[in-house]
Amino acid sequence: MKLLMKVGVLPTYKFVDVLGFEKDYLKSFSHEVCAVLLLFPHTEQHDAFRKNQHDEHKGKEPDASIYFIKQTIENSCGIVGLIHAAASNKDKLKFDADSALKKFLDKSADASPDDRAKILEKNEALCAAHNAIAAEGHCRPNEDGVHFHLVVLTAVGGNLYELDGLTSKPIDHGATSKGTLLEDAGKICKQFTERECGDVRFSSVALVKAA
């Protein structure tokens, strides 16, 4: 929540913890969800999966209305994830008149994913927010050398998309709806945990409407 306010988002939406991906828990989640952010260990298994996934999605073009930005700044998955979540739900969020995030989204609206990354590199206010996230160490390597990474799952045009600045494009996971977004996103998050064979170093938050 502090990060949202730091970049000029008014407190009509907030981040809350998602404590698990089991179906019963997700069904009992009482908040209105518009995006899910997943932090996970970036391992060799993940890279191998991404390569296969890239080959499978060749030729499949995502919805042209999706806001997608490439990650070029080191350890910047946190601010890139925030940008993806906010841009995909810009119609729901409210911003301060002098909001750094809204100014960035407006300026980069018609740019390519690569050019958006270049604009971000020169944005002092958002880079300061990135530095605050990086200082917390969430996307730095752990003691065993494993880095952590963050992706966003959100709905665009009735489909669930995974937004990861390290991939070449948004990943389409099929149809979803306002009422099933969390459950559908939870299924994808669960696939991440299952691929890592017992690793429990996962955490997730949802962008939800504040009460």
Image (tube, grey):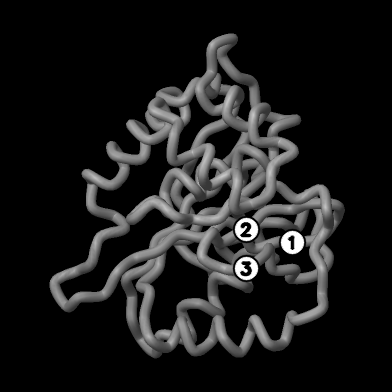
Quarter of the image with the N terminus is: top left
The residue sitting at 55% across, 19% down in the picture is: 10
Report, in whole angstroms, how far the alpha carbon at label 2 lies from the one at label 1. 7 Å
> Mark 3 is on which residue type?
Ser
The residue sitting at 33% across, 55% down in the picture is: 75
Q: Sequence-wise, which precedes: disc 2 or disc 1?
A: 2
> Residue 153, which numbered label?
2
**Is residue 6 placed above or below 120 in the rendered structure?**
above
Mark 3 is surrounded, within 10 Å at the Cα level, by few (under 14), some (14 to 19) or many (20 or more) other residues, namely some
Q: Is residue 119 left or right of residue 111?
A: left
Residue 138, image quadrant? bottom left
Describe the element under mark 3 as helix, strand or loop.
loop
Describe the element under mark 1 as helix, strand or loop.
strand
Q: Sequence-wise, which precedes: disc 2 or disc 3?
A: 2
Front disc: 3 or 1: 3
Residue under label 3? 168
Instruction: Say which of 30 and 5 sits in front.
Output: 5
> Mark 2 is on which residue type?
Leu
User: Where residue 32 sits: x, y (%)?
Assistant: 67, 41
User: Where residue 13 sits: x, y (%)?
Assistant: 58, 30
**Is residue 43 placed above or below 177 in the rendered structure?**
below
Residue under label 1? 160
> Mark 1 is on which residue type?
Leu
Describe the element under mark 2 as helix, strand or loop.
strand
Pointer 2 and pointer 1: residues touching (CB < 8 Å)? yes
Pointer 3 and pointer 1: residues touching (CB < 8 Å)? no
Quarter of the image with the C terminus is: top right
Front disc: 2 or 3: 3
| Number of numbered discs | 3
> Residue 111, which numbered label?
none
